[in-house]
Amino acid sequence: MTITNFDPNSIGIASNNIFGLPTTEENARLMIIPIPWEVTVSYRNGTARGPEKILEASYQIDLCDADAMNFWQQGYYMPEPDREIVKKNDFLRHCAELIISNLSEGGMTCDNAQLQKKLEAINSGSLELQQRIYDQAMAYYKKDKLVALVGGDHSTPLGLMKAVADTFGEFGILQIDAHADLRKAYEGFTYSHASIMYNVLQEIPKMCKLVQVGIRDFCDEEYELIQSNDRIKTFFDHDIKERQFEGETWKQICDDIIAQLPQNVYISFDIDGLDPKLCKNTGTPVQGGFEAEQIQYLFKKLVDSGKRIIAFDLNEVSCGEDSLDSIDANVGARILYRMCNLFMKSNTHA
Ligand SMILES: [Mn+2]
């Protein structure tokens, strides 16, 4: 199944699907699930609009990718976001704001019956979201499609990861992120964006190795977990930089990162792993991090190694007040496109 009669040299047509491609759900090999969800963000709103902004920016992308030519012909398709998720996000986000503002004034959620009820609604709403995404991904797997997800905040891919475990068996996660995301129920939210990898370790036993890259903002509890749990290997940003300052190349470091991963690899890419100049409006920006090309190179090396990308997510892409001014969605769309290409390459036998 390939897309024919399409001129990749022409301009992207906005009535087409993502990247301006004339793909349909039927002829797509890769489904990109958009999840406009940011219920538990702790610092700044905006990432719920990530999928929509990435879609808008995606029409500007040139399709030629020298590392992975013509894979778009296998069909990339982003369905409409689920309206139920949009509604639920708006309502629960409001509840979360009240809880967070009470916490920041020194209050306790459990001392306030109304807030406690809201917290319970958020936790069960997050579970419901997870189940919807799991069901959607499993339905695509039944149709022999590949699946990726665009958030939304970093809590969103848990349902996809569970579907991946039930479909592919044992796998590892390559996480690009400024944060470790190993907090237990951050701010009381069981499925917080800051707890995604803690929840993966608890709830997905088939996830055998978590390899974190670029981590530079973490608390004591997370650091202790990293040191004591042999399912986790963390390449801290400061260690990576120090190795480079002392003469090691990025290639040597990438080889070490890839060597830590098992055969089947899920990539979880939090955009804040990059230098914040590339994601100014993301929820929780932190100085340091990577150029987009460094991460692209890491992914390319991963595919060259013969390890297989089985699924991926891209999350925490946001937009500014004036989205035309913002680089975030533009960077996000380009990263998404190249990840799609490498994902296809990794799943296509030469
Ligand atoms: Mn994250």
Image (cartoon, rainbow, N blue to C red):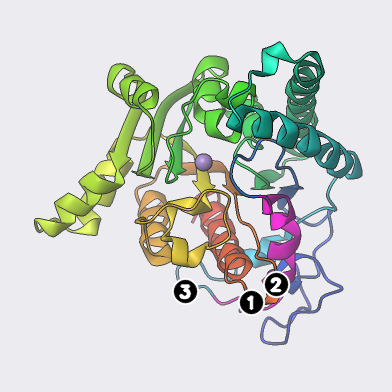
| Image disc number at residue 325 | 1
Q: Name which residue lies at 79% across and 26% down.
A: 125
- Please indicate whether residue 196 sits to the left or right of residue 51 in the image: left
**Residue 320 location, quadrant:** bottom right
- Give the image quarter of residue 73: bottom right
Q: Tag 3 or tag 1, which sits nearer the N-term?
A: 3
Which residue appears at 42% of the width and 54% of the height? Answer: 299
Badge 2 density bin: few <14, some 14–19, many ≥20, Cα 10 Å: few
Question: How far is mark 2 from mark 1, CA to CA?
Answer: 6 Å
Looking at the rendering, the stretch of residues picked out in magenta corresponds to: 45-64
In the rendered image, the residue lying farthest to the left is 246
Residue most extreme to the bottom? 10
In contact (CB < 8 Å): disc 2 and disc 1: yes
Q: Secondary structure at mark 1?
A: helix
Task: Quickly name the residue at label 2.
Answer: 322
Left or right: residue 302 versus residue 43 is left
Q: CA distance from mark 1 to mark 3?
A: 28 Å
Amino acid at the residue labelled 1: Asp
Q: Pointer 3: what residue?
A: 66
Q: Disc 2 on helix, strand or loop?
A: loop
| Mark 1 or mark 3, whichever is nearer to me | 1
